Amino acid sequence: MAVKQTDYPPLVIEYHGNRLAGVDEVGRGPLIGSVVASAVILNPSRPIEGLTDSKKLTARKREMLDVQIRDQALAFAVAEASAAEVDQLNIYHATHLAMRRAIDALAPAAEYLLVDGNRLPGHALPGQAVVKGDARHPAIAAASILAKVARDAQMAELDIRYPEYGFARHKGYPTKEHLAALSAHGPLAEHRRSFAPVQRQLALL
């Protein structure tokens, strides 16, 4: 079930129970929409094959695993911090807010956290931050998959409402296509006003 990762030493986990939650986020870099976080407690008696960093999977494979995770995990939750909260708090603090919301929504509650990245999100539960964790532990990989599928669905919905921006293709990241659409059509209410390319367009209005 675990993903092999040769660039890092073996992951030593300081917890041996069954309510360990993997936590990850998607959407720090885009210019629009929420940052989405997920927390997942996998069921040791129902392992899921193929869990790895969501970015390494095709959209079809992610969606298949998303259904499997929701069906087989002991608990899972997906939460977010809005674009307005990103602007108010900054992306770093908004990311941790979304993570804490996901952790708090788990039922049954987690006892220990494995969080992707190099910082814990400031939750009361004990845990470890794991660099490249989505490629090193299946619970973090599962969280990355749920968060990615949820955020991509938000971008697909935005694409239906605003097809001229191409959100289904670039998912809100600052690609040439997105920047050109931003210049041609201006920022939407859902854009993050604190991000520099959006700020520049707002200054021209």
Image: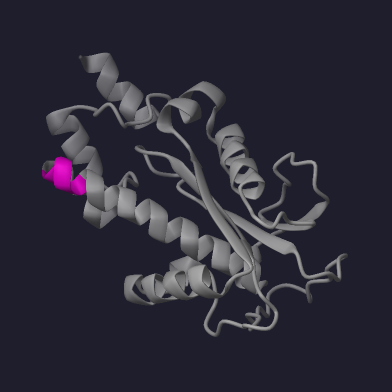
Q: Magenta region, mostly helix, strand or loop?
A: helix
The part of the image, by quadrant, that contains residue 148 is bottom left
Name the image quarter holding the C terminus: top left
Q: In this view, does 197 lie above or below 179?
A: above
Horizontal side of residue 78 vs 74, given as left or right: left
Protein image colouring: one colour
Residue 20 rendering spot, x and y as whole percentages: 74, 64
The image position of residue 39, as x and y in percent, is 61, 56
Q: Give x and y (percent) for residue 203.
A: 28, 15
Taking the view exactly as shown, the residue that stands out farthest to the front is: 108
Residue at the spot x=61%, y=33% of the render? Answer: 93
Tell whether position 111 is magenta.
no
In front: 75, or 161? 75
Part of the protein shown in magenta: 159-163
Q: Quadrant of residue 40?
A: bottom right
In the drawing, does residue 1 fall left or right of residue 155?
Answer: right
Q: Is residue 7 left or right of residue 60?
A: right
Q: Residue 198 placed where, x, y %? A: 32, 28
**Closer to the camera in the image, 143 or 76:** 76
- Give the quadrant of the N terminus: bottom right
Placement of 191 over or under 139, stated as above or below:
above
Query: At 71% across and 51% down in the image, what residue appears?
Result: 118
Above-or-below relation of 148 to 33: below
Callout count? 0
Residue drawn 65% across and 49% down?
A: 103
